[in-house]
Image (cartoon, helix red, strand yellow):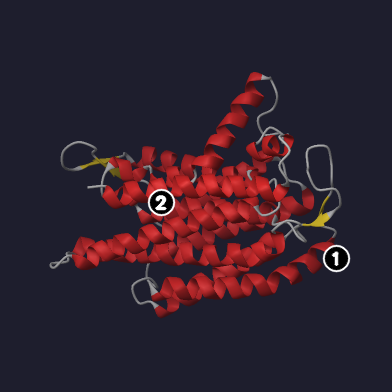
Amino acid sequence: MISAALACIIALIISSALTPAARRLAIKCGVMDLPDERRVHEEPKPRWGGLAIYVAFTAAVIAAAAVDSRVHIEKQLLGVLLGGTVIAVAGLLDDKYNLSPIIQILAMLAGGAILISFGGQIAFVSKPFGEGIQWFKPWLAAIITLVWIVGVTKTIDLMDGLDGLAAGISAIASGTLLIMSAHALANIQKMHVPTAGDDVRVRLFVTVAILSGALLGASLGFLRYNYPPASIFMGTIGAQFMGFVIGASSVVGAFKVATLLAVSVPLMVLAVPLLDTAFVVIKRALRGNKVYEADKSHMHHRLLDRGLSQKQAIWVIYLITAVFSAIGLFFFWTAK
C-alpha cells in the first residue's frame, strides 16, 4: 500500500499546485461558467479545474506504478489512463465549445471501449448461492461494462452542481475503494498457501489502490479551491474524468470475487448520485422534457430550496454518501 499512499500524496501536491494555473489559463482562454436560471452561482467562474485533476492523477499513477513491480506490467492500468485521456480531451473541448450530448456520450463509449480492449470489463459474477461463478458472453460483458462506465461518468457529471459537491463525493468514493482494496490485499496475504490466481488478484487490487489513492489526492487538492465559495469549477473535464476513473476502478478491482453481493458494493458507494440521477431522469421523462437538459431538480437544488446554504447542502450529501459507503464496506468485509 506504500505505492497507493505515494500516489495520493503526489496527486495532492500536483493538483493543489496546478489548480491556480488552470484557473489563469481558463480566464485567458475565456472558458467561463456564466450564471443563468439553472445555476446557483451569481458571477462568472473559470472552468478547467479538471485539467489540474487530470494531470495530477495521471502523473501520480505513472509514478506509483513505476516503483511497484506488481503493477507496472498491468495492462488494465494503461487502459484506464488511455480511456481517461479520451474523456478528459472531450471534456476540455466541451467546456470551451459546448459539445452536443451525443458527442459526449460517444466519448464515454470510446473511453469504455478502450478500457475493455485492455482487459477491463465485468466478465463474470460469483453465484449468490452455491459454488462457482457465472460467466457472461463477451458481447454481454462489453455491454454491461459500457453501461456501467457511461452511467457512473455521467452521474458524477450531473452531481457537479454545487461548489465542492462532485469533488467531495469523488473523494469519499475513491477513499472507500482504497479501503476495500487494502482489505482485500490483507486477506490474500493472510493465506498461507497463495496460488497463481492470488498473484493476479494482488496485482489488480494494488492497481485499484493506486488509482483510488491518486484520485483521492487529486480530488482533495482541487477541493481546496472548489470548496464554497469556489474560485474555480472543475468543468466537464473534471467531473466526467473523475466519474470515469471511479467506474473503471471498480471494474478493474473485480469486487465480485466473493459473492454477488460484493458486486454491488460500488453501487452502495455511489448510491446517492445514482439514485438522484435516476430520480431526475424519470421526473424529466414524465414531464415530457429532454432527459439530458439541465434543470434544478437535483437533490442539491431541492436542499437549497428548503433554505440550506451551499455548505450545509453539500455536507448533508457528504454525510449520506459516507453512510452508504460505510454500509458498502460492511457488506464487503462480511461477504463470504
Work out which quarter of the rendered image holds the N terminus and state it: bottom left
Disc 2 element: helix
Observer able to see residue 93: yes
Measuring 67% from the left and 48% from the top, which residue is drawn there?
Answer: 312
Label 1 Cα neighbours within 10 Å, binned few <14 / some 14-19 / many ≥20: few
Label 2 Cα neighbours within 10 Å, binned few <14 / some 14-19 / many ≥20: many
Q: Residue 216: where, in percent of width, then height?
A: 53, 63
Q: Who is closer to the viewer here, 81 or 306?
A: 306
Q: Tell me which corner region of the image, top left, top right, bottom left or bottom right, holds residue 208.
A: bottom left
* Left or right placement of residue 247 versus residue 41 in this view: left
Q: Residue 317: where, in percent of width, then height?
A: 59, 45
Q: Residue 207: where, in percent of width, then height?
A: 40, 65
> Is residue 119 shown above or below 101?
below
* Left or right placement of residue 329 versus residue 238 in this view: left
Measuring 69% from the left and 57% from the top, which residue is drawn there?
Answer: 234
* Left or right placement of residue 237 versus residue 207 in this view: right
> Is residue 63 shown above or below 129?
below
Q: Who is closer to the viewer here, 78 or 253?
A: 253
Disc 1 element: helix
> Is residue 321 shown above or below 178?
above
Q: Please, what is the three-letter code of the amino acid marked with disc 2?
A: Val
Q: Residue furthest bottom?
A: 67
Observer able to see residue 120: no
Residue under label 2, please give it. Answer: 251
Which mark is first along the chain, 1 or 2? 1
Q: Please, what is the three-letter code of the amino acid marked with disc 1?
A: Lys
Q: Residue furthest left?
A: 193
Residue under label 1, please give it. Answer: 28
Q: How many marks?
A: 2
Q: Residue 332: where, in percent of width, then height?
A: 32, 50
Measuring 56% from the left and 52% from the top, which residue is drawn there?
Answer: 169
Cβ atoms under marks 2 and 1 closer than 8 Å: no
